[in-house]
Image (tube, rainbow, N blue to C red):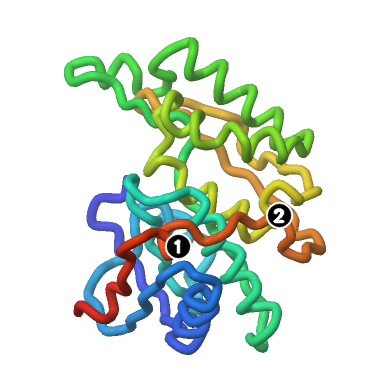
Amino acid sequence: FIANMPFESPGNPALGQLLAREANALGVETLAHDATTLAPEYGTLVPLRYMNADQHFKVVSVSALCTGHYLNDSARLGWAMRRAVEQHYDGTVAFLASGSLSHRFAQNGLAPEFAFKIWSPFLERLDHDVVRMWQQGEWTDFCAMLPEYAAKGHGEGFMHDTAMLLGALGWQAYDGQAEVLTPYFGASGTGQINAVFPITLQDGRAIPKAQASAADGFSLVSTRL
C-alpha cells in the first residue's frame, strides 16, 4: 500500500540544528544537516501522508541510533530534543516515534500465513503485557526491562525509537498513561500498535547520563568528517 506513494513535507532546518545543539550539550553526539536526498523513513511516511496533506506541518526527520549504540543515549537524546523545544523554540512541536513492539518477521515461505498474526505466543503475550504496562503507567518497571525486552522480544531497531520517546517524556519519572488509538494487531509476524503518550511536567532528574561520550577513547564524529 506504500508502493510509489508520493509524499512531500517542508523541512525545518532551524529546529533541526537547535535539537542537535542541545543533544550535543547533553553529551549525546548528534549531527544535523538539511542537504540530503534521503526520504523520511517508512514509519514516518505513513502518518505524514494523512496528517500533512496540506503541508501545514514542517518536519525534522530524526534517525534512530544503531543497534550497537546505547539505549541510555537514545533516552538522553529524546530529553535533549524536548528541552530544546521547551527552552528555545517558539512554536508547538509533536514527536512521532516510529517502531514496533515485537518485530520477529515470519520466515520465508510463511509470510502469507502470518500476514495478520504474531510470530509466536510468547511474543504476543509479551507485547500484551507491555501495552498493559503503558496503559497503567508502569514506567519505572518498563524502562528497567527495556534492554531485555528489546533483545528477547526482537524489538525493532533494538527499541531505540521507544527509548527516545520515553526520554522526551521523562524516562522513569514519566507519570502519564498511554492512550491506545488502534488495538494491538499482527503484521507479517510483528506486533503493532498506535498510541498517544500525553506530555506531563518533568524536570529531567530520571534521564540517564550520557554513555558513549563518557567512554575512554571517545572522539567526535564531526572531527573526522
Quadrant of the snapshot with the N terminus: top left
Disc 1 crowd rating (10 Å Cα; few below 14, some 14-19, many 20+) is few
Q: Secondary structure at mark 2?
A: loop
Q: How many marks?
A: 2
Q: Would residue 58 be found to the left or right of residue 202 on screen?
A: left
- 180 relative to 145 in the view: left or right: right
Q: Give the residue drawn at x 65%, y 57%.
A: 207
Locate residue 198, reporting x and y percent: 74, 55
- Helix, strand or loop status at disc 1: helix
Residue 214, labelled with which disc?
Answer: 1
The residue positioned 32% from the left and 47% from the top of the image is 68
Instruction: Say which mark, if any, is on residue 206.
Output: 2
Q: Nearer the viewer, residue 127 or 142?
A: 142
| Residue at the image point whose x is 33% and y is 81% from the top | 33
Q: Is residue 182 above or below residue 149?
A: below
Q: Residue at x 18, y 16 (%)?
A: 109
Is residue 126 shown left or right of residue 159? Answer: right
